[in-house]
Every structure is written in C-alpha cells, then in structure tokens.
Image (tube, grey):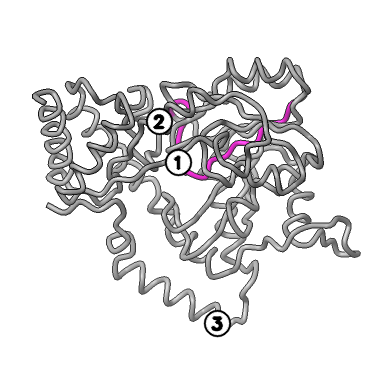
Amino acid sequence: MRVSFHNFSDLHPVGVKDEATKRFVQIMEQNSFIEGAYNQQFEQKFALSQQAKHCMLVANGTDALELCLRAYDVGPGDPVGIPSVSFFATAEAVVNVGAHPVFIDVDPKTCLMDPESLKRALNGPKLKAIIPVHLYGMPAPIKELEVICQPCGTHIIEDAAQAHGTCHQPGRVIGDSNNLVTYSFYPTKNLSAFGDAGAIVTNDTSLVDKIVMLRNHGRTPSGHALIGYNSRCDHLQAAILDLKLDQLPSLTQKRREVARRYCQGLSSLERIRFMPKRFVDLSSWHLFPILLPSSQERDSLRAYLGKCEIDTALFYQKALCDELTLSQYNGEGDAGREFCGTTISLPLHPFLTNDQVDYVIEMVSKWEQQETNG
C-alpha cells in the first residue's frame, strides 16, 4: 500500500480549482495584482481565526520574522535567543538584521524552547528578543517564557510557521497573545498558498503601523519614513489563502484524528516515543515526529518503511547550532542534537484513510518486532 507524505491532489479538488481560476481571472480583469481586496479580506478573517486584532500579510515567513525584529528595533550586535532546533530561517532572519543568535536548548520531550535553558542564557548579556518556535505544530510554553522575559524587557516573537490553528490551551489559539506571531503559507504548510506568502498577527496595536510601513519600502503618504522591505503579498496568493482559510478548521481536526490514531496504535511499542499526550487535541499536527533510541534505529526504521512504500522525512537532520554557517554563535544545544539524531516524521495529512494509517502502524510494529527478535 502506498502512503505519501503529502497529498496535493486532494487538497486542490475540482471545486477549489474552479474557484481559484475564477478569482485569478477576476484579478487579471481588474489589473489588481498587489495588495488587493482579497489581501484585506484575508487579513480580517485570519486575524479573527487566530483570536488576534491585527493581521498583516507579507511576502513569506522569513520576511515576517525579519519585519518583527525590525519592528522591535533589533539590529547589529543585538543578541536574540532562538531554539537549538528549527528550520534555518529562524536563525537566518536574526543574522539578516545584523543581530547575533544565542542558542536556547529545547526540552528533550517536546523539542520546544526550554524555559530553564532560557534562564541560563539570560545570565549573560541581555537578550533583545527571543523567537520560540511552535515546532511541528506543537504549542511552545509561551506563558512560562513570558514570565521569564517580561522582567528583563526581552521581546517575544513567536514563530508559528508550522502552527496554523494550534491551541496553547483548549479554546485558545496561538496568536491571541500580545506578542508578534509569524506564519508561513509555503505550499506544504497546513494553510498554504500557491507559492510563497507569510503573515504577522498581533494584539499589540502600537506596532501595526510600523510593520505596514516596513513591508512596503517604509512608505507613508508623505514619503518614506523608514528603510523598509519589498515584502508585499501579491493579490493572487491572498485570493488563494482567502479561499482555503474556511477549510482550515476541518482539516486541522482531521490531522488531530490521524495523530490520535497513531498514538493509540503505537502506544504499546517500546522503541517508539512521541510527543506528550496533552498535545493530541492542541497541536495542529503539521508533522508527526517519533523518536527512536538511536540514529541507527531511526535509519533502520526509515529504510524498512521505504521498502513498504511508506514515505517518511527527517525534520531536522542537524541542530541549528551545528550548522557550519552558524558555528560562530554561542549557546546550548545538547538536547537539540540528540533530538535531531533520533527523530523521524511519519506521514500525516488530512486525506490519509484509516486503512493507510493502520498500515503504517502495522509496518512500524513489524519493524520493532523484527528488531526485538534480532
């Protein structure tokens, strides 16, 4: 049985294609290619869905991080705390504004920023900001991090590139804080454009005007008040995001159902460890990572599942602190290194059938039995 890691065909059925085509033709007829009506419509709807007052579309998720750093006046030489495990863009955005990443280690059980590691980092030079990441769609411990950061005046920028629809507690969605929260709408994300796009949401009204200027060359009606970016989201991408946003709650629920089925089906295995059970109904499950006792067993399982026509992926193969281009920066990363070396992601998307999920469970179980019996 073939089990794919992504399923773009079911994500874009005939109805979506027809409506997308209709919107594209409308945009061409109006010659409204940048920051059109769909941009404003999506921003209002997405802010509401994330329980935030404001949403600002930008060109991509990396720009969203850079714009937030600039909004907080983070610049050359400023230390910024980032988790030891994330996609490279989290560190890249810090370096691109001239700041210095400081690696904060992750909780070995969740791969999310560890508050205790953050406390140790704050014993050194004051961090201008931190960027906790809601990795894999799991909610980072923002409330704990806020308690630590607020007395120091350290800003928090939440990287929610993988966390559209994630809850930090029942009924409370990531995005409802007073922090700046960034999203990516890259085509593989839970809410995806047909190309690159990103967004920033917040309840902090004081920063909105500055970010709006920064994303559009620092422009104001009277001139250019800032040196900004060309980070406007084009109207075509906004139209697609607006079209697909209504599907997000139901697709997130289907992801949670798949995750719950995995957790139940794999719970008796001794070699497999996965995210804490409290995340089952909170996470948006962008990915379903499982942990093995060693990198050798991880690689063995991946090869076995490949022979069974089950796609898997490695997110991430190395910790950020081990990237050659980031080797000059300091911090902690031992837990992150171990997590990266023993983690594999199983297929998880809203269109997996129960039979496919059960097949993956069966093959993982057979692999463990094979390993146990030698």
Q: Nearer the viewer, residue 210 or 307?
A: 307
Farthest left residue? 373
Where residue 358 appears, x then y in whole percent? 14, 39
Q: x and y percent of residue 129 in the render?
A: 71, 32
The image shows residue 123 at horizontal and vertical percentages of: 73, 15
Residue at x 13% of width, y 42% of height: 359
Give the CA separation, mark 1 to mark 2: 9 Å
Residue 61 visible: yes
Tell me the residue that label 1 is attached to.
Answer: 165
Residue located beneath label 3 in the image:
28
**Of helix, strand and loop, which one carries label 2?**
loop
**Sequence order check, earlier mark of 1 and 2:** 1
The amino acid type, in three-letter code, at marker 2 is: Leu
Secondary element at image label 3: helix
When asked about the image quadrant of residue 136, the answer is: top left
The alpha-carbon separation of the residues under discs 3 and 1 comes to 31 Å
User: Hey, which quadrant is residue 263 in on the image?
Assistant: top left
Say the numbered circle drawn on residue 282. 2
Mark 1: amino acid: Gly
Residue type at mark 3 is: Met
Residue 221 vs 82, above or below: the answer is below
x and y, in percent, of residue 339 in the image:
42, 28
For image coordinates 22% across by 43% down, the residue present is 303
Residue 36 placement: quadrant: bottom right
Quadrant of the image containing the C terminus: top left
Magenta-tinted stretch: 154-170
